[in-house]
Image (tube, grey):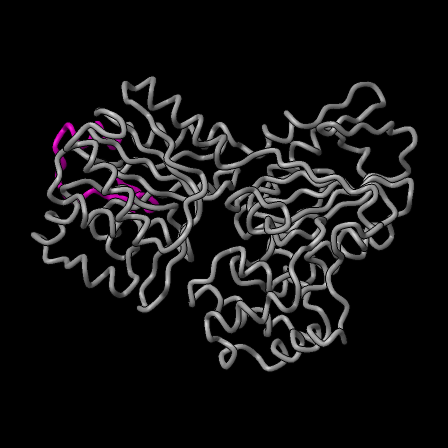
Amino acid sequence: MAPMVIKTENPPPSKRDKRNRQPFAKPARILRLRRHAVAIFNSALKAVQAEAAVRRACRLKGHILYIGPISRDLREIENIIVIGAGKASAHMAAAIEHLLGPKITRSLVSVKYGHALALKNIRLVEAGHPVPDANGLRATRSILQLTEKAKKNDLVICLLSGGGSALLPLPAPPLTLSDKQITIRVLLACGASIHEINTLRKHLSAVKGGQLARSAYPATLVTLILSDVVGDKTDIIASGPTIPDPCTFQDCMGIIDRYAIGDRLPKRVINHIRAGMAGEIAETPKPGNPVFADTHNLIIGSNIEALMAASQKAASLGYHPMILSSMIEGNTRDAALFHTAVAKEIRRTGNPIPAPACLLSGGETTVTIAGKGRGGRNQEFALAAALEIMSENDMVLLSAGTDGTDGPTDAAGAAVDPCTIDDARRAGIDPTKFLADNDSYSFFQKTGELLVTGPTGTNVMDLRILLVR
């Protein structure tokens, strides 16, 4: 099973656990809430493990392969080709290898550094995320070569999870990898949503936005998808390489104008988008295109499944659980204010649920970077929330990415309580300065409240757990 969260209260000393040391004593009742929050998070992770999700979706009975509602007689299949990309795609590949093993003819799956597994029949290549690198470029070229060789009697199984966009970085000519790297950095820094970022990615790519499906045609193409986007929009997950693309070059220019970033993007990128708007470059394949005639896309895991499991665990621990939404978006700090406001309402009036309560939410917020610190949306969410609950009693908030990585850090997120801010200030640590500098990681390093999981074997966006005793 995937590694679970390192508990933050008095962990045993080791190199890894130094990030999570707890320098401030916590009241026993707060420690109990923290243990419960971790247990609820772990139950959510267990429910959406990628390998288990693939095994639930796929089975082999005799010569018949069933993938969701699709079935194929393997005696009629000449080649089985396995491709894919994403943070959880190695675990997805492990399940396919267990099912099909030596029946797999050719394969290549692109995974984030540190997320690979030892497989026998499926080749994995590690590459850069969230900013693509040369390894990802080479892997994507190889994947495209595999699909271009696919014939009508071949079966292509594509495994996609969050992170697939960065791990499939093949720029459309004449764009370069550097052009895409700069573009992604600018989009991440300006606070663009994943929907907006992936709209541009699709139109700067040779494989995204349905173009991988076009390459695999006329083979049968079945894509198994672990969703990491709000609303489970398949054209956005991993930038939809096997999905008809409803977005246009005009949409891309609208995003650039909305954030006023045209002067910060490479000239080749701007010229490419303008050429597409003028009809000089072909659009990505749209709904109804015949290349999708034998293409099948199946979501096998999502955020709401994790929230449902978290809710069940919270109830078993004696809490009244409430799922606020699996579709929380928008500014991270605004979202933190909303969540803590609901918790305060529970404490004051018993609405919308009585204490002991467990508020749950999922989704993916955005951080507008104004400082020079380190952190991610979950750590920034936790720090902003800590400032709001410092005068409250017996609350704990945990915010973490289900993939085990929050922004450009090795932490999944952080957990806070009403003691967090007072303890920090008594130690001469000013939380408002760290928040202003987008340096939540450094703050939680000092307070010992980082959550470090390592790769979790899944990726279904973020989870937030707020306990009110």
Res. 328 visible in picture: yes
Query: Residue 163 or 101: which is nearer the viewer?
Result: 163
Residue name at image x 72 percent, y 24 percent: 59
Point out residue 171 in the picture as x, y percentages from the top left corner. 68, 67
Residue name at image x 63 percent, y 40 percent: 225
Residue name at image x 87 percent, y 27 percent: 73
Query: Residue 121 or 13: which is nearer the viewer?
Result: 121
Identify whether 416 is placed above or below 207: above
- Residue 163 belongs to magenta span: no
Res. 18 visible in picture: no
Left or right: residue 47 versus residue 293 is left
Identify whether 376 is placed above or below 89: below
- Residue 14 belongs to magenta span: yes
Left or right: residue 394 versus residue 374 is left
Q: How many marks?
A: 0
Point out residue 49 in the picture as x, y percentages from the top left corner. 53, 32
Query: Residue 369 or 108: which is nearer the viewer?
Result: 369
In terms of image quadrants, where is residue 16? top left
Identify whether 456 is placed above or below 59: below
Residue name at image x 14 percent, y 51 percent: 424
Quadrant of the rendering where the C terminus is positioned: top left
Left or right: residue 439 versus residue 56 is left
The residue lying furthest to the left in this view is: 426
Point out residue 87 in the picture as x, y percentages from the top left corner. 55, 46
Q: Which residues are magenta?
A: 13-35
Point out residue 270 in the picture as x, y percentages from the top left corner. 61, 78
